[in-house]
Image: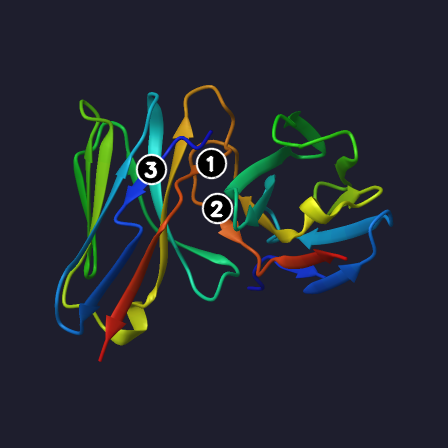
Amino acid sequence: GAGVSQSPSNKVTEKGKDVELRCDPISGHTALYWYRQSLGQGLEFLIYFQGNSAPDKSGLPSDRFSAERTGGSVSTLTIQRTQQEDSAVYLCASSWSGEGNEQFFGPGTRLTVL
Amino acid sequence: SQQGEEDPQALSIQEGENATMNCSYKTSINNLQWYRQNSGRGLVHLILIRSNEREKHSGRLRVTLDTSKKSSSLLITASRAADTASYFCATRLYNQGGKLIFGQGTELSVKP
């Protein structure tokens, strides 16, 4: 079946603009994760969804970042008033449950803030 | 700060040689996973080892886990040029949901 998909694959935006990144998990996967990868910080956890609820938002770096998940499927990560330090590859992953199973990653969205 | 630290940061070997990468972590884990990443994009899951396991094999991959030393190693035997990639260890902590905490990665280059 289809893997995790993310859109757009690349996004270039100007500082101060808002952006929305989309993740389509593997059908049936109840758990969904957002991570961010940048040169200086490596791979960082952002937020975890179980169904439509987000029991762990501890990795969101500021209140400019938010995420939602609807219908237990698609998730959107929104970054408001983007800053240059937000430039990174944003990776989404899904798994069968939140309990110790392997995570399947999407190809990522490369965000560049000018 | 990152839970895992990996060494070496970069490793260059010839095809046919074995490659060993090490990962150390700080706090008790539920499991430890190894992922591979090509060209800085999506990660591919390689192997998962639970905290009560000591060794696991998958094809040319062998992973060990020493919870007393809080360390793991990934061995790739008979390496191929196609194994060239970045390799990350990731830990899942107890009572932390499913989130993974990644190490900084080892960049492996296998020369034909």
Of residue A42 and residue A70, the one placed in the foreground of this image is A42
Count numbered badges in the picture: 3
Of residue B49 and residue A82, the one placed in the foreground of this image is A82
Tell me if mark 3 has few (under 14), some (14-19) or many (20+) residues whose alpha carbon lies within 10 angstroms of its own: many
- Amino acid of disc 2: Gln
Q: CA distance from mark 3 to mark 2?
A: 20 Å
Of residue B99 and residue A24, the one placed in the foreground of this image is B99
In the displayed structure image, the side of residue A93 where residue B69 appears, left or right: left
What's the residue at 63%, 52% (across, down)?
Answer: A88
Which residue in the structure is indicated by mark 3? Answer: B5
Name the residue furthest bottom. Answer: B112
Which residue in the structure is indicated by mark 2? Answer: A103
In contact (CB < 8 Å): disc 2 and disc 1: yes
Marks 3 and 1: which is nearer the front?
Answer: 3
Quadrant in the rendering for residue A68: top right
Image mark 1: chain: B
Who comes first in sequence, dot 3 or dot 1? Answer: 3
